[in-house]
Amino acid sequence: MAHLAVRQLTLSHFRSHKRAVIETDGRPIAIYGPNGAGKTNILEAISMLSPGRGLRRAKTAELARVPETVGWKVSAILESLGHTHELETSFTGDGSRTVLIDGKAAPQIALGRLARVVWLVPVMDRLWVEGADGRRRFLDRLAMSFEPSHGEQTLVYERSMRERNRMLKDGITDPSWYGAVESQMADAGAMIAQNRLQTIARISAAQAIATTSFPAASLTLVNADNSEIIETADQLRDAFADGRRRDMQAGRTLVGPHRDDLNAIYATKDVPAAQCSTGEQKALLVSLILSNARALAQDFGAAPIILLDEVGAHLDADRRAALYDEICALGAQAWMTGTGAELFDSLGNRAKYLMVDDGATSAIHPIP
């Protein structure tokens, strides 16, 4: 199978890093050092090599190093499916984030055609016990890994829904005012629903054929009122039109993919994820990320780049070892962080090691 890897990563005024250059050899990378040293910032920089707002969902201006605030730049040499590409994404302090691929301006979605990036960060550890918003974002990120245009569809849907909600609050009743907006919502919403369902099917299939130490999750897409998920644009248009009076009373749109939720059951125990232990919930998340990676390896032709922040949290030594074994078996370049080198003992020489110093310089030291 072909390989997908960042061979060189350069950060300029990105978060805590004034300038940093990391050379790799395609192996997984274990990054360790004290809290606040800038480890997560390295992973966030790599996440900006994919469409969207990155693993912290930060605003573009917030990524700039302070106090300079002169903008920021992330550059990379990417090995992808037998080809080498130069990627650059930057923000100059005004305007919007720009993307260059092999020296030519490109839309963000083009990044998704060259590199697939998936991640797991500590804030996701409470995914199963908090609100549906986080689970939708998690599912949408998985969907975007399979279909990069999914992100654009969610933006179109959200923008149109804000306009519809404004009309509802203003008490507008003329159907002609709603037609165009609801049509946009319906077209984008149908694509969102179909992408989400296909993503669940692909991950479920990847779980079913895997030999793994991590538990399988039975996944379903549900909505707020437990009715059937609406998958076609025509059905959504009808639902929006039929619901205008009720929505006007509520002051917002009450039907559509923005009301969907991802439901997960710990399969072998038949227990909802929300009722599992903290360790079991983390293991389920790891299982989904690994299944996502397996499915992408089949679809894309190479395992995705995997970002695992504070990977040791809530995983015992055996589970960590199993995770590293599966990453290596996939042939994936995983970038992983932890506070101590001992968290990566079971990786041995299968990984490249970087130590990040605390302090203003955030120095990065390759470890032989």
Image (cartoon, grey):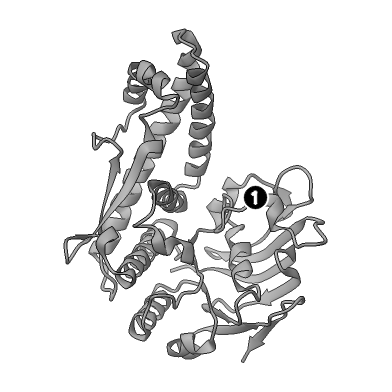
* Left or right, 209 with reference to 78: left
User: How far across and down, in percent of the image, does residue 162 sit?
Assistant: 52, 28
Query: In terms of image quadrants, where is residue 295?
Result: bottom left
Nearest the viewer among 130 and 158 is 130
The residue where tag 1 is placed is 59
Nearest the viewer among 18 and 23 is 18
Name which residue lies at 35% across and 57% down.
129
Query: In terms of image quadrants, where is residue 268?
Result: bottom left
Name which residue lies at 68% across and 82% down.
357
Query: In terms of image quadrants, where is residue 241?
Result: top left
Tell how many labels.
1
The answer to whether residue 280 is above or below residue 157 is: below
* Left or right, 172 with reference to 358: left
User: How far across and down, in percent of the image, does residue 324 sit?
Assistant: 41, 80
* Left or right, 235 with reference to 21: left
Question: Quick check: can you spot residue 258?
Answer: yes
User: How far across and down, in percent of the image, does residue 103 sit?
Assistant: 74, 54
Q: Quick one: label 1, few (<14), some, or many (20+) residues within 10 Å?
A: few
Name which residue lies at 30% across and 39% down.
223
Name the image quarter holding the C terminus: bottom right
The answer to whether residue 163 is above or below residue 124 is: above
User: How far across and down, in percent of the image, does residue 105 sit?
Assistant: 71, 47
Name the image quarter holding the N terminus: bottom left
Q: Amino acid at mark 1?
A: Lys
